[in-house]
Amino acid sequence: MKRKVGYAVVGLGVGKRHAEAAAKSENANLVAVCDLIQEKLDKIKEQYPETLIYTDFDEMLKNPDIEAVSIAVPSGMHADFAIKAMRAGKNVLIEKPIDITVDAALEIEKVRQETGMKAGVVHQNRYNADMTPMHNAVVNGKIGRVLFGDFAVKWYRTQEYYDNGGWRGTWNMDGGGSLMNQAVHTVDLMQWLMNSDVESVTSQMAIYDHKIETEDFTASLIKFKSGAVATFISTTCAYPGISTDIRVYGTEGSMEADQDELKLWKFKGAGESEEKEMLDKYAGNGAAAALDPTLCTGHTYVVEDMINAVLEDRDPSIVPMEAIKSVRIVNAVYESARTGKTIYFE
Ligand SMILES: NC(=O)c1ccc[n+]([C@@H]2O[C@H](COP(=O)([O-])OP(=O)(O)OC[C@H]3O[C@@H](n4cnc5c(N)ncnc54)[C@H](O)[C@@H]3O)[C@@H](O)[C@H]2O)c1
């Protein structure tokens, strides 16, 4: 019988889903959770009476039964919490974005190497069923040479969503608005599906419909080193939450998805039956997350992957150097929008 990994979670917003995934895993025990809000801790205690509750993260890290911690506090705190945990001998699974600056993310990677701990980052949308065939079509050459992509995160969030918690839509804790928070998943998918490093980013941003410090709309033109180009739109103003468009076009075919729902699959030489089969097989839940933040799925898979990484002594599926890519692109978008200049990557 496999041994069980002692698991903990800090931050009980989306962190609740990490806690539930660890609690129901056959390969882990939910040893402890930590939050500043007693009511959230009490709810977990009700659900899982064996689980210890903490209001002080440093105290929780002293618990020797904890081997891995999910870091689900506001984004601008990720590096501080992850670094503390790794220095205390714990493996970490960090919510997206890895942190809000490239420097903070690089610091996480440095400490990972120094301590030998494992570090994974939550970009669960890569595991939406339709993303595997789309990614395979690119890396196996089915789509030919990737020419252009078209990505748009047309979501809706209320003012109340931003007011709740006080950190959303702030530069110092959220690191941005619709792009850094909601669309960073799709930025990750874009750089993964376009299968090339970014060469340059040219962007604009605006605050259209919320009282926030950051942005609720960005539009970018992204050029890749391969010569391909992508357009990228992010917004939390598209009432009532429309779609997450993920579209890639190559010399041999075209594919389009709305988040986890494949919408178009057309390849030269492939018959209509192939398209029908693919659309039937990858008919997902479409724009669920565009409407409601609680409907993002995929945490069970990511937490299980972290647990298995500890048991099998391997890296988690998405490591810091991979997660840094989307943070670098997001920050380049902001810099371009602020300065009115095209930002070139090295
Ligand atoms: N992967 C996804 O789909 C997904 C979805 C939502 C949020 N997130 C990410 O998860 C993170 C948290 O977002 P959220 O929406 O859950 O926020 P939230 O505000 O709902 O929850 C954050 C929690 O952290 C707690 N906290 C803050 N400081 C703390 C401290 N010093 N010690 C202990 N607890 C502390 C707060 O009390 C709060 O309960 C963000 O980085 C966000 O980008 C990811």
Image (cartoon, rainbow, N blue to C red):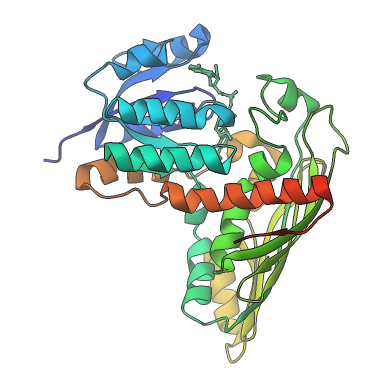
Q: Locate residue 9 relative to residue 227 in the image: left or right.
A: left
Q: Can residue 242 be seen in this view?
A: no
Observer-nearest of 288 and 34: 34
The picture quadrant for ligand 1 comes to top right
Looking at the picture, tell me which residue is in the foreground, 130 or 179: 179
The residue most toward the front is: 346
Residue 94 on image: x %, y %: 45, 36
The residue positioned 52% from the left and 75% from the top of the image is: 137
Name which residue lies at 72% across and 52% down: 243
- Above or below 183: residue 214: above
Percent x, y for residue 156? 76, 39
Image quadrant occupied by the C terminus:
bottom right
Q: Is residue 275 visible?
A: yes
Query: Which residue shows up at 71% across the image and 28% down it?
Result: 170
Position of the N terminus, as image quadrant, is: top left
Question: Quadrant of the rendered structure where residue 207 is?
Answer: top right
